[in-house]
Image (spheres, rainbow, N blue to C red):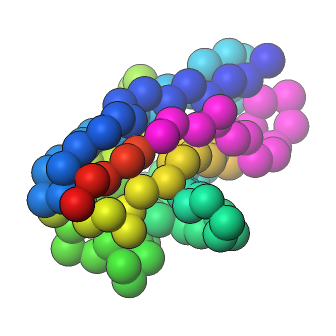
Amino acid sequence: QVQLVESGGGLVQAGGSLRLSCAASGTIFSINAMGWYRQAPGKQRELVAVISSGGSTNYADSVKGRFTISRDNAKNTVYLQMNSLKPEDTGTYYCNADITAYYRRDYWGQGTQVTVSS
């Protein structure tokens, strides 16, 4: 059984930084793309950043230049370094991974709350 476990959320003042981590565990044959999504209250879940198995990255326009996604394939872990945080970055952040275990499918973490105060 595959699980994604996130950590690193919290409360921070505007301009501050946080680092999110997401570790995949279980019977895993390979991990393809990994990414972070977020959902603010009353809004739809949106893509924040994604990284391919080869390290190619893509970011939402709203976080370019402030957030950095990275991964450690040996640890089956993806990170999101968030700098210069803004109140509009507030929301629940979800880890997503395209994983091949007994078969290939998407997995989601339970979410971690990020709150940026003004």
Q: Residue at x 75, y 47 (%)?
A: 106
Q: Position of residue 32 (x, y in %)?
A: 60, 49
Give the side of residue 45 with respect to residue 34, left or right: right
Q: Is the magenta stretch mostly helix, strand or loop?
A: strand
The magenta stretch spans residue 2: no
Q: Could you tell me residue 16's position as x and y percent?
A: 14, 51
Residue with the most extreme front position: 118
* Residue that sits furthest to the bottom in the current view: 61
**Quadrant in the picture for residue 59:** bottom left
Q: Residue at x 68, y 24 (%)?
A: 3
Vertically, is 85 above or below 43? above
Residue 77 horizontal/vertical position (percent): 44, 32
Highlighted range, magenta:
99-113
Above or below residue 87? Residue 32 is: above
Q: In the displayed structure, does residue 74 sit left or right of residue 53? A: left
In the rendered image, the quadrant that contains the N terminus is top right
Left or right: 73 as drawn, with respect to 37: left
